[in-house]
């Protein structure tokens, strides 16, 4: 898919490794309505500090992104590097400097080498074209084992609206936001207030529902650019039918990307959906599900294909949500293993063990205390997770 008015480029500049795509550029021919969601970590990387200030205008025209160096915990020099690299883009594209968003991912505490960007900039600009979206998705990978892209068309107001989206993320993944970058391009005609509202709602039910290891990064960000090239009626009223349809389409796209991140969790062998039902409040269901999903003991049990439901119960008990343990049912896929707080017995555990041999697993916990159901998405902890993160800087 191509979206008129957007072009992309990626180069192997040698930010950290040789002969590996590591700098990407997304360019809108005209200023696009742009919204963003950023990390909630108190330690915020220099690019994000700059981006958040610039996005107050609700418009952007370019996104410069690199892997190999996070440019986080780099002080005044790191901020200057973000400003300087964005200036390079602005000068080459003949646009205003404040219209450039910058994004970095990689090792924390390492200064960004601006000379690398200066040398790469002519090739990066010359390479801009409509067919390089996948190359940019490759350029933002760190420990990812696969590119993560989604293309979608949604009909709104009788007109076709196109979406192209990419993400990176594999480890250091935990809401709110995670070690992940995501960029979405659309040709929708939509106002800033409506776009910002849609992005936040879509992120809340997608990227903010995943966890690989419980760690939240310094560089997390999601940006969406809408260049208005589609012929749809302007979406300029929150909670209008058109706005709700836009949110639904965006949410589906971001959820697909989020599930790719979970499935690509560092060393992951299982992709696991934790579904909490029968809760009184959404917050309760999410808190219980997140506590289960972040339990190292639960995650290692899944890696070992051991239906150790007691670890799930223990995680629920420390979630801070009050419930009646004697009412709880637990299912592994469709296998009921716990009923009213007690082991079902018989062949249930052996059947559950067979479920755990699958790649994609669903755990359903029925608290029988209300009508709310919510999902959290996670993966197992494997031996490879330890190896990857023990050797990350080398």
Image (cartoon, helix red, strand yellow):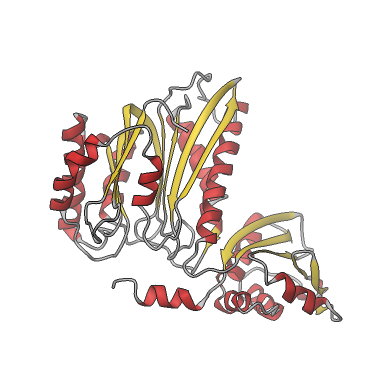
Q: Nearer the viewer, residue 4 or 79?
A: 4
Q: Nearer the viewer, residue 223 or 313?
A: 223
Q: Position of residue 49 (x, y in %)?
A: 28, 50
Does residue 143 appear to the left or right of 371 in the view shown?
left
Q: Nearer the viewer, residue 30 or 374?
A: 30
Q: Is residue 256 above or below residue 265?
A: above
Image point (30%, 52%), residue name: 21
Q: Position of residue 22 (x, y in %)?
A: 29, 52
Q: Position of residue 190 (x, y in %)?
A: 47, 27
Seen as rendered, the residue at the extreme right is 346
Q: Is residue 127 above or below residue 270?
A: above
Q: Nearer the viewer, residue 120 or 41?
A: 120
Q: In the rendered image, which quarter is residue 61 located in? A: top left
Image point (55%, 43%), residue name: 253
**Which quarter shows the C terminus?**
bottom left
Does residue 123 appear to the left or right of 232 in the view shown?
left
Q: Position of residue 268 (x, y in %)?
A: 53, 68
Q: Is residue 276 above or below residue 248?
A: below
Q: In the rendered image, which quarter is residue 60 located in? A: top left
Q: Is residue 228 above or below residue 115?
A: above
**For the image shown, how many numbered marks are present on the structure?**
0
Image point (48%, 62%), residue name: 174
Does residue 218 appear to the left or right of 340 in the view shown?
left
Seen as rendered, the residue at the extreme front is 19
Q: In the rendered image, which quarter is residue 347 located in? A: bottom right
């Amino acid at each position: 898919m191509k979206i008129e008015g957007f072009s992309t480029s990626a180069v192997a500049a040698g930010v950290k490794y040789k002969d590996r795509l590591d700098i990407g550029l997304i360019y809108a021919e005209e200023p696009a309505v742009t919204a963003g969601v950023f990390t909630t970590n108190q330690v915020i990387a220099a690019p994000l500090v700059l981006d958040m200030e610039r996005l107050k205008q609700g418009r952007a025209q370019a996104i410069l992104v690199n892997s190999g160096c996070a440019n986080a915990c780099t002080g005044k020099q790191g901020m200057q590097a973000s400003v300087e690299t964005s200036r390079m883009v602005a000068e080459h594209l003949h646009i205003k400097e404040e219209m450039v968003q910058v994004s970095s991912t990689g090792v924390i505490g390492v200064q960004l080498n601006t000379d690398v960007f200066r040398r790469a900039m002519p090739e990066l600009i010359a390479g801009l074209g409509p067919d390089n979206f996948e190359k940019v998705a490759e350029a933002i990978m760190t420990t990812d084992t696969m590119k993560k892209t989604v293309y979608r068309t949604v009909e709104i107001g009788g007109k076709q609206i196109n979406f192209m989206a990419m993400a990176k993320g594999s480890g250091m993944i935990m809401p709110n936001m995670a070690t992940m970058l995501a960029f979405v391009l659309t040709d929708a005609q939509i106002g800033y207030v409506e776009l910002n509202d849609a992005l936040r709602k879509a992120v809340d039910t997608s990227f903010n529902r995943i966890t690989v290891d419980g760690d939240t990064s310094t560089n997390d960000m999601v940006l969406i650019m809408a260049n208005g090239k589609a012929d749809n009626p302007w979406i300029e009223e929150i909670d209008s039918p058109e706005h709700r349809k836009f949110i639904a389409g965006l949410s589906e796209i971001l959820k697909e990307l989020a599930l790719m991140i979970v499935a690509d969790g560092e060393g992951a062998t299982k992709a696991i959906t934790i579904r909490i039902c029968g809760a009184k409040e959404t917050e309760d269901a999410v808190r219980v599900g997140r506590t289960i999903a972040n339990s190292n003991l639960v995650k290692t049990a899944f890696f070992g294909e051991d239906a150790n439901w007691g670890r799930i119960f223990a995680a629920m008990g420390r979630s801070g949500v009050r419930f009646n343990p004697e009412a709880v049912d637990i299912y592994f896929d469709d296998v009921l293993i716990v009923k009213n707080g007690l082991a079902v017995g018989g062949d249930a555990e052996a059947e559950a063990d067979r479920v755990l041999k699958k790649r994609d697993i669903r755990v359903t916990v029925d608290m029988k205390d209300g009508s709310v159901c919510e999902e959290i998405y996670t993966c197992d902890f494997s031996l490879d997770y330890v190896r990857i993160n023990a050797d990350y800087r080398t």
